[in-house]
Amino acid sequence: MTGIFNGDTRVGLNLRSQWYTNHLARYRTGSLHADTKIYPKHMRGFWSLGAIFNYDQAGDSRLGLVHFGGSGAYTYPLSRTHFISAGLMLGLAQRRFKTDDLVWDSQWNGDVVDPSLPSGEAFENLARSYVDFSGGVNYQWQKSYRKKLNLGIGAAHLNRPNQSFNAGTTNYPLDMRLAYHALAEWPLLSQLDILAHVLYQTQGPYKELVYGGYGKLFFNQKRGKEFALLLGLSVRHKDAVIPKVAAEWSMWYAGLSYDVNISDFQRATGKLGGPEFALIYRIVHVRPIRDFKTCPIY
């Protein structure tokens, strides 16, 4: 999906706090991303380059992940309304944890936990770095900027990097993650669109299904002064319902969603999942007529 947006350059930020009421399971996630298009002469399609920085931290061990990835994609127009894209990402990642706030069975003195007692634990490493490869393909049908459909599949951790903290020959490969997605937008009225999405992911024995829909109400559709509000609901199958509200104003997009836990885990969370905030800004260049080349992707 690198470069699949209306404009030339895009930058964005995502912030998330999950299960923040449960200190054993809560985690915080942050993501910064940017991508831009390159229009080579004498070619029908266009190239896109992107970069993303992800940070994640969880639990009393502060188990964290720092990931930086660079992506590249090529989009080829099959016709005026049909497009196919393929992309690759090369990432560098590091997982680390801390033992300062951890306690162990050996520190139980019979009455209370005594942190001054030896833990009996010896760790070879508190950090592990690895290289990570990902790739994907996407098909887009687009009649206009309000009539479009995306279908795609992405594969992360193609090289199944070793994420073990132990040195030597210990190997704990990171399972490949497959993600299948569908995104659609369709106008119902002159000022109202319906958006729908489905995401299905598998990684080893784990599976996740998220689906939902939104209404998008336009208050202004003048070029450069567009303003619309989005309101909808998603469901993470058998786990949570996720209400969402967002606003689009000219080149800005801001959205806020919140997980409401409905699975048995709500006993620990009190149904409080977590908020997520997204902010995106797009840049559209105005070119001289002699150099202008219409971008088909809205």
Image (tube, helix red, strand yellow):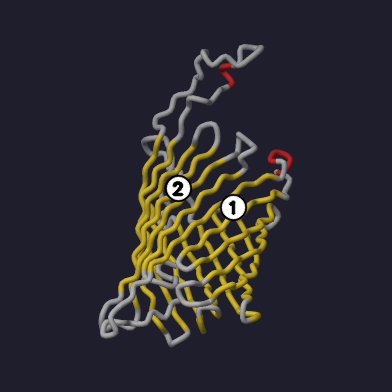
Q: Is residue 3 left or right of residue 153?
A: left
Q: Quadrant of residue 215?
A: bottom right
The amino acid on which the numbered mark 2 sits, given as a three-letter code, is: Pro
| Mark 1 burial class by Cα count in 10 Å: few <14, some 14-19, many 20+ | few
Q: In the depicted view, which residue is nearer to us: 274 or 99?
A: 274
Report helix, strand or loop for mark 1.
loop
Image x and y of residue 192, in percent? 63, 76
Q: Is residue 245 above or below residue 216?
A: above
- Looking at the image, which residue is at 46% across and 30% down? 98
Q: Which residue is mark 2?
A: 173
Q: Amino acid at mark 1?
A: Pro
- The kind of secondary structure element at disc 2 is loop
Asked whether the beta carbons under mark 1 and mark 2 sit within 8 Å of each other, the answer is: no
Image position of 40 (left or right of 202): left
Locate residue 162, reporting x and y percent: 41, 46
Q: Which residue is mark 1?
A: 205
